Structures are given as structure tokens and as C-alpha cells.
Amino acid sequence: MAPLVHLVRHAEGEHNKGGDAYFIRDPGLTERGLEECRNLSERFPYHSSIDLIVSSPLRRALHTALFSFQPAIARGIKIVALPELQETSDIVCDEGSEKSDLEREFADAKGPSGENVVDLGLLYEGWWVKKGKYAPTSSALIARARLARQWLRGLPAEEIAVVGHGGAFHYLTEDWTGIGNTEHASSWQNTEFRTYRFVDDTENATMVETDESRAMRGEAGRILSSEEQHSLYLKVMQFWENRGFQNPLKKEVQFKEQDRRLTT
């Protein structure tokens, strides 16, 4: 049976201050972010039932996982860094760190038996470079999110916590509701968590938020159809472009034009 998945957005990072902070590479958490982790740890009700913690390899997500899930970590639960969960844009704050640097940073994070808590085994040289599979284009982001869903669905676990990013979570869940109602690029708030279940065994590995999760956040209305979500997705792309956020559709055209020039 596919696992139940609790998606958790990271706590406040240094880049969330805006302005020049967006040019901090792989920023860590702020003091407020650390406090958000403490609050998340207190209100997260699934510490005793999760079998695994999966995280984006960006530092703000790994630190959120490490500081927020200590009750589970104390039981011997590990954090696995999955590169497919990294954030979607190619701005500096969404560039990751070298694996060797992360290994040094998290070397002292130990479990109850002295084992390393943070598993970086899936990372490789240049995992954070936004090209190929990780390019900030519409087709690449959709395909990457599908790979992440497939990987999560195949885990031999009953219940997992996944720490990541607002933009990436919209692609992962294929849910584009709530964007555009505020000045933010995502409807996910810092350390917000929502629970999802897999609803099919097809290649797409579709995830749907549980009724209980939707009710907890006041979204108990009708679930949009795939056609309605696609229409909303196109509107979100336009909103992101208008607000100066990432614009994967335009980038896709630019990448294709570059490829055409190289091959003609």
C-alpha cells in the first residue's frame, strides 16, 4: 500500500526577507524560522506514526526537518534528502550546496544510536544546477514532480513527512488553488502541513489531499477537476510573470530557441 504523505513547507529562511536576500545562495533559517520549527514540533500530531522523513536538500528544508521532527528522530527515524524536491526557480537563493559541504554541516546530527540522521546518499555533484531534469521550465518541472511522486509512492513505509517548498509543492500536488489571492507566489505558509494520499497506480502517481486535511485548513469545498486545475495553472503562470516571480513557460520557449540555434 502506498504511504500517507504529510507535506510540510520549510520555516522562514533568510531569503524570505526579500530584496538582496534573494541573492543569498542556499540560505539557512532565521531566528523566526527556528521559532516556527519549535511551534511546528509542538503542533504536528504525527511524530509517533511517521516511518520516514524526506526533505529537499536545500538547507532551509533540511534544518526545518531536523529541528521540527526531533520526537520522531529520537525514535530512530532518518531524514532522506531527495534532489527532486528542490525549489523550482533558478534564482540564487534556490541554488543548493555541494554534497561535501552538506556532509560537513550535518555531520553532528546523530540519532539515538549515534548514527547519522541526515542521509545525503541520493545527492551527486551538481545536483542543484538548474539544467536538464532540474531546468526551471514547465515541462521539466512537471516531469520532475512526477518522478518525486513515483519515488514517494514506492517507499516501503506507511506514513512519511516530506519537507519542501511552496512552488515545488504546487507542482507535486498538481493543486494551483490559492495563488494570486495574496502577494505571495505560493498558497503554502511557513511550516504549514497538509496530508495527501495516492489515488491511483498509474505513471502519474496522482496525490489528493485528504478530507480531514482540507477541513483542518478550511478548504472543505468541491475539489477541482484536472481540467479546472490546468486552467488555473495557466493563470498562475501569468500571475508569476506579472509579479516578477519565476516564469517557466517563457523559459521553456527560451530553452527551445537556444537548442534550435545550437542544432542549425
Image: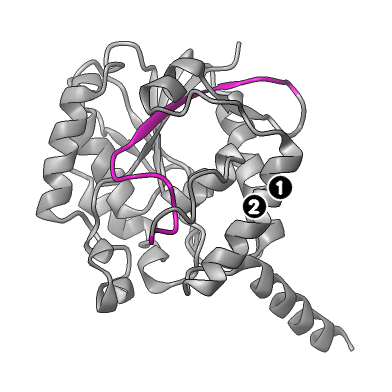
Classify mark 2: helix, strand or loop. helix
User: Is residue 184 on the magenta stretch?
Assistant: yes
Residue 1 against residue 87 in the figure, above or below: above
Q: Are marks 1 and 2 in contact (CB under 8 Å)?
A: yes
**Disc ID at residue 207:** none
Quadrant where the N terminus lies?
Answer: top right
Classify mark 1: helix, strand or loop. helix
Magenta range is 183-201
How many angstroms separate mark 1 from mark 2 (CA)? 5 Å
Residue visible at 32% across and 72% down in the picture: 22
* Side of 227 where 157 appears, left or right: left
Task: Identify the amino acid type marked 2.
Answer: Tyr
Residue visible at 15% across and 33% down in the picture: 39
Q: Position of residue 225 (x, y in %)?
A: 71, 33
The crowding category of the residue bearing disc 1, from other C-alpha atoms within 10 Å (few below 14, some 14 to 19, many at least 20), is some
Query: Residue tagged by mark 2?
Result: 233
Residue visible at 41% across and 66% down in the picture: 95
Q: Nearer the viewer, residue 103 or 13?
A: 13
Residue 210 against residue 185 in the figure, above or below: above
